[in-house]
Amino acid sequence: MNSKKVILITGASSGMGKETALKLAGEGHIVYGAARRVEKMQPLVDAGGYALKMDITDDEQLEAAVQQIVEEQGRIDVLVNNAGFAIYGSVEETPIEEARRQFEVNLFGLARLTQLVIPHMRQQRSGRIINISSMGGKIYTPLGAWYHATKHALEGWSDCLRIELKQFNIEVVIVEPGIIATEFGDVMLEPLLEHSANGPYSEMAHAIADTTRSSYENESAYSPPSVIANAISAAVSARRPKTRYVAGKMARPLIFIRKYFGDRVFDKAVMSQVK
């Protein structure tokens, strides 16, 4: 791959996506940031990048974005699938339409964009697809069933994709962030309280809400988005990238406990934080 790469990153209007787009542009890459809130990507434009309006669930917008980049640059070297969000709430109380929306954004929209990019990478016999999963793709937390389901699915989907595309010299990388200072906490709290604050799961819902608020109020409890931007940058520039990059507060210890101590120990550990 060339040292100067053409990169498309979704969810680039805030948080990890914005930080990553700015970092990659600063490193001299040709960066296209895509998001619904295109007006929030002016800093990327000022840094020499390009802003694309994109709803990850709108097929026409996905096709238009890929076509524009190929027409303007002749290639797409790196796709960073970063767009995503979290809904929390009990399985029983979360409307199935909202659960489907969670999958449409976190998995199917990402997958469709990847389908559109792969033929161009296959034709050029090179490419790198970086999927932003979460430590939540390896662990679980109470009332987060639908969110964790999407991230667990993304992990398995990415592993299969990596094997499929290796023959074409296209690499697939998974990034698993821990607790990061983004809009994640605010976004997950609203549906959590809307769905489960007043029903049979109210005690658990309020405990999780309190824990989440206190975590994001304590600067030592989370990592800045730059930690993930650095990991993605490393995955972009590495001659042979790792298949997984784990970064951010609590990611490594929680994944370790889940993997090596088993379900019952992890159940106790995670529930001890919401009492």
Image (cartoon, rainbow, N blue to C red):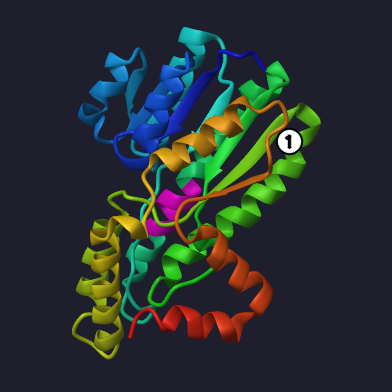
Which image quadrant is residue 5 in? top right
Q: Is residue 151 left or right of residue 48?
A: right
- Is 245 situated above or below 60? below
Which image quadrant is residue 39 in? top left
Q: Nearer the viewer, residue 112 or 236?
A: 236
Q: Amino acid at mark 1?
A: Leu
Mark 1 neighbour density, 10 Å: few (under 14) some (14–19) many (20 or more) = many
Q: Residue at 52% across / 40% down in the picture?
A: 112
The answer to whether residue 56 of the structure is visible from this angle is yes
Residue lying farthest bottom? 200
Q: Nearer the viewer, residue 15 or 257?
A: 257
Position in image of residue 16 (x %, y %)? 38, 40
Q: Is residue 151 left or right of residue 19?
A: right
Position in image of residue 95 (x %, y %)? 31, 71
Q: Total number of numbered labels?
A: 1
* Residue 107 in magenta stretch: yes
Rendered-image quadrant of the C terminus: bottom left
* Residue 13 in magenta stretch: no
The answer to whether residue 138 of the structure is visible from this angle is no
Q: Residue at 58% across / 84% down in the picture?
A: 265
Q: Residue at 68% across / 73% down in the picture?
A: 260
Q: Which residue is mark 1?
A: 165
Residue lying farthest right? 167
Position in image of residue 170 (x %, y %)? 70, 30
- Is 224 situated above or below 6? below
Label 1, secondary structure: give it: helix
Position in image of residue 103 (x %, y %)? 44, 57
Magenta stretch, overall SS: helix
Q: Which residues are magenta?
A: 101-108
